[in-house]
Image: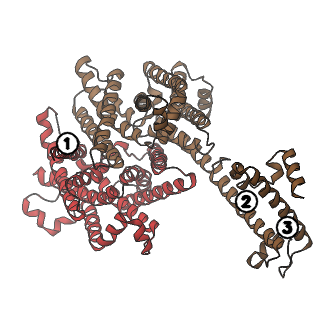
Amino acid sequence: MTFLQIDLPAMTLAILAGLTAALVGNLLILRRQALMGDALSHMVLPGIVGGYVISGHPKSWAIVGGALLAGLLGAGLISLIQRLGRLDAATAMGVVLTTMFAAGVLLIEVINISGIHLDIEHALYGSLESVIWLYPVGWKDIFNPAGWADLPREIPFIAGTFFTLATAFFITAKEIRLVTFDPSFSATLGIPFWLTELLINCAVAIAVVAAFDAVGSILVISMLICPTATARLITNRFNLQIGVSLFIAAFSALLGYVFAVWGAPYLGSPGAVNAAGGIACVAGTILVSTSILHVLLQKRA
Amino acid sequence: MLESFIGALLLEGGYNSVLVMVGLGLLGAAAGPVGTFMIIKGRPLLADAVAHATLPGIAAGFLLSLFLTGDGRNPIYLLVGATITGITAAGAMHLLKDGIRIGEDAATAATLSVSFGAGVVLLSFIQNLPTAGQAGLNAYLLGQAATMTQGEAWLVLAVGATTLLILFLVFKELTISAFDPIGAKALGLPVRLLDLLTTALMLLIVASGLRAVGLVLILALLVTPAAAARFWTDNITRMTAISALLGGLGAYLGGALSTAISGIPTGALIVAIMSSVFGFSLLFAPKGGAIAVAMRKHRLTKHIQRLRVLGRIADGVALAELIKVARHYGWADTNGRPTMSGEIAAKSWAKEEKLRSLYLTDRPEEANRITLSLMPLHRLIPRDVLADLERRSS
């Protein structure tokens, strides 16, 4: 039963990662900060390597902490450089993201010299394929709590992140709408600009770090952006947009995985192809076809 | 290691590494100015999207070359593939952006990640194939200048030199159309063509630099020197020259380091050098650096405080909250009464003020230069003009 042990946990992880990223992506798209997702997913690298050096093994919580720290440090650096240098946000992001990513790469080289091995490709492409849940031998075992302790760390972590973020979203829905659509009015109500900025950066960093395990540092961007951008084309209503984006994210994750693992051999591949890449392709295809449909419908109207 | 680094710097590292370093230096020198124009146009991260989008092209080029020649590592196929998907991505981004409601930032991020995803899928497909040579593809991610062939090095060198030449020839036209597209159109310049030329040069630099710098970090070649140059000057000609210098030097040094320390990705080394230069410029540049700006601000605050104190003494008004400042300069005693030196300073301030206002009634067009300066009037205007003012005011 390799399906229960390999494919089911990987699919669950991919769907949860997609849901988490898409949830936060709604904020990024509406605030026109989509590139912050790009920057953050690069900037967490030195934190991940640092966490790995401290803890010594690749599935440790220190990695999550390090990544979060590096993400927030990078976001802080971006706004500092913007202010000190009177540069625009995109330029500051370009400088900081390349700097921090290069720092991560050099750090990897240094620790590889000292004998521990860490792959840069692993960080870029993700490790959906290496998620294994050995416990279940039959379908009944999935619901046996005794086996849950055996779950790969990534799944409870991302599930926890998703439900925490979703709850926070639900509770502060009114405030989120306010600061997103009318930041100056929310500033007069006493919600300072830097606080919203910090909280949103934190939420994105957490989502990026959590989803990172599943889909890798660059492909996380597609889950942040594509489902929400598609949802924006379909609806103007905020709540509906969030719902649609979550649905598209889960659907892309599922379809992408199925395509990469079971579809690729039909297309001439000797084995399965990278699932995270497949998911990004599906999400991109959905976005592009929706855009084309959107343009055609508008022309007719 | 140090010895081999110095040896490489002095171009003693053998024909191949000299070629790589000179090529990288030229490419960096060309990338700096192109990056400056990209920043002025407000699209600094377009290069990042294009760079990531070259991955599927590289993989497809590998497959095609494997299919046609039996060996996947023909750099021409990889380069052509990279250029094609890079252009496709730039076009797709343009369509998405103008596709009604997708903002430019979202279009960039979506293009970047999806095309990279497609590249990753193709790479994993290649890794499944029972052929050798796919390991060489990893060099395109983070750059491996030390293992470049002579042909690859010549290509970098040629692209760098050509781009520099083109920039030199149409520099004036590019500057005008980047800053003021409407005015440039009125002058009869082909604005769209020049815009396209900038993007094409960016694409050319990205595609040819991939092998040496890597697609994840090549953005730094375009953005970092250009951003650093802004701290040194406000003049666009000087700014592009400085970004060319910083870019060329950074890439050259990175190449030298990479030949000295084998195995470390060249892209990371170049970024480390360029980012250090950026950090230094951000803090210490005499014109726009953070320290210089803070000091100027401090001096201005002090100057305005002094003027307020002198104004109050001259008008005979109580100093109130300014007593501390006045005492600092010895212009008042503890009770806030002006001292002798305070009276003298106030008198000469009043005289200077009178001359200034007289001068400004004569020549109101000079208002900005005179009122914004901290210098005394005799440093700002010719001596005979000042003498004339003094004669008329007395």
Crowdedness near tag 2: few (<14), some (14–19) or many (≥20) residues, C-alpha within 10 Å = few
In the rendered image of the structure, the colour used to display chain B is brown
In the rendered structure, the residue with mark 1 lies on which chain?
A
Are labels 1 and 2 assigned to the same chain?
no
Residue type highlighted by circle 2: Arg
Q: Is residue A141 shown left or right of residue A19?
A: left
Residue type highlighted by circle 3: Ala
Disc 2 versus disc 3: distance between alpha carbons?
20 Å
| Residue at mark 1 | A292
- Between residue A33 and residue A291, name the one nearer to us: A291
Tag shown at residue B346: 3
Residue furthest out toward the right: B340
- Residue, x 28% and y 63% (percent of image)? A157
Are labels 2 and 3 assigned to the same chain?
yes
Rendered view: B241 above or below B330: above
Rendered view: A294 above or below B355: above
Residue type highlighted by circle 1: Ile
Q: Where in the figure is residue B100, as x and y percent of width and height?
A: 27, 47
- Residue, x 52% and y 53% (percent of image)? A82
The answer to which quarter of the image holds residue B298 is bottom right
